[in-house]
Amino acid sequence: MVLLVHLSGNRDYTGDTTPKCVCFPFRDSRNGRQVSWLGPELRRRSRMSTNPEINPLSTTFPPSGTQALPTRKIRIIGVPLDMGASRRGVDMGPSAMRVAGLEARLEALGHLVEDGGNVAVELAETQNFGSPNARYLKQIAETCTRTAEAVARTLGEGITPFVLGGDHSIAVGSVSGVAEFFRRQNQKIGVIWIDAHSDINTPDTSPSGNVHGMPLAALLGMGPEQLTNVLGYSPKISPENTVLVGVRDIDAAERANIKRAGMAEVYTMRDIDERGMRAVMEEALRAAGRGTAGYHVSLDMDWIDPEDAPGVGTPVRGGATYREAHLAMEIIADHGRMLSFEIVEVNPVIDEHNRTADLAVELACSAFGKKIL
């Protein structure tokens, strides 16, 4: 025997209000009362699953134990740019994360997810790299402007931007877009920059001329005008609300630039080793959130140890472990003040069976509220 329940106009966890019918196995009834039915058992099994190919019941009931936060509308924005790095391949990062099931796995948490496609990016092979001190600066600045406009437009529609890189130079665009949206409301934002590197070089200090080592400097107002002045103003963020987490490979000139910028919140891997991830992240989030509308989270996958994330362009030994990385994302989700999110530097060309992209998707799920229980 089957119990047929008609749900008319009830909003399900995906936000859908269309009428629907759900069938539950049912053993018997007595005087119109249910005395034994299998619905809860089936629902419990389906709610605990995070498999994107879950059975139809789970599309009506949100997965229990996997999403403890209010659901969001999320727009995926790909930026397949690799001109900021010397090693090619991160332009395929957005595709690798999509192939790893990003959209379906976020939807399994109850979020409404749409893929906004990719921002237009020039092919490096067709371009002149320009000055060796800041290679492809013109093309990168143009891509960052398009990215900033897409991010600001997304926020204006009440949707959380989730930007996929691409090398880390795209952060000039993503952060500029978030900062511009809240600047219109007379608010400022914080930034959590999670990376093995500090990315605070300028063309005058960079030993390589690779722009993916310059975005944080540009956002703080240091460096070439093409980057610092995206969307027509500078700086985009304040040093007191900008936090570096997990750094372990910093150039000598970058140490000077950190002091010059006035950044006080810099947590190295030694801080994480000595104090633990929870203490570091709690302090970092307090600093980024102090007096701000919230914060943008910029996650460079080379922050994680190459044992767990081999597919990155600039790997550095001694990074965060698999569980430390998840814990950091879970704490970000617990605080509930993340305005936007990006993952960069996934390089499928040197990855192993898409391991790094798959881990990136796992970490994104944790940042957007996935829980163990």
Image: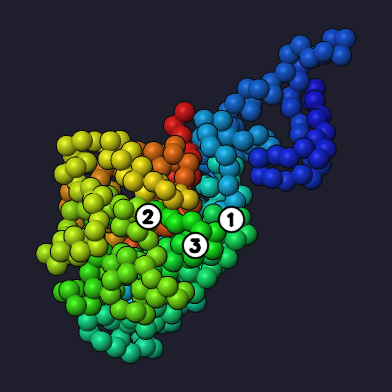
Q: Give me the disc on residue 191.
A: 2
Q: Marks 2 and 3, how far apart in space?
A: 15 Å
Q: Residue 159 — which label?
A: 1
List the single residue furthest toward the right. 31
- The circle drawn on residue 308 is none
User: Is residue 212 depicted above or below 324 in this figure?
Assistant: below
Crowd band around label 2 with a 10 angstrom C-alpha radius: few (<14), some (14–19), many (20+)? many
Q: Write the residue at 79% across / 25% down.
A: 2
The mark lying in front, picked from 1 and 2, is: 2
Please name the residue shown 73% across and 13% down the image.
36
- Figure quadrant of residue 131: bottom left
User: Label 1, label 2: how many angstroms apart (C-alpha)?
Assistant: 19 Å
Question: Which label's residue is closer to the chain start, 1 or 2?
Answer: 1
Q: Amino acid at mark 1?
A: Ile
Residue wearing tag 3: 183
Residue 247, given in percent of the width and then of the height, sits at 22, 53
Residue 52 position in % (x across, y down): 55, 45
Residue drawn at point x = 81 percent, y = 40 percent: 9
Q: Secondary structure at mark 2?
A: strand
Q: Could you tell me which secondary element the residue under label 3 belongs to? A: helix
Question: For the point 42% across and 63% down, which residue is it?
Answer: 175
Q: Is residue 295 above or below residue 66?
A: below
How crowded pointer 1 is (Cα within 10 Å; few <14, some 14-19, many 20+) is rated as many
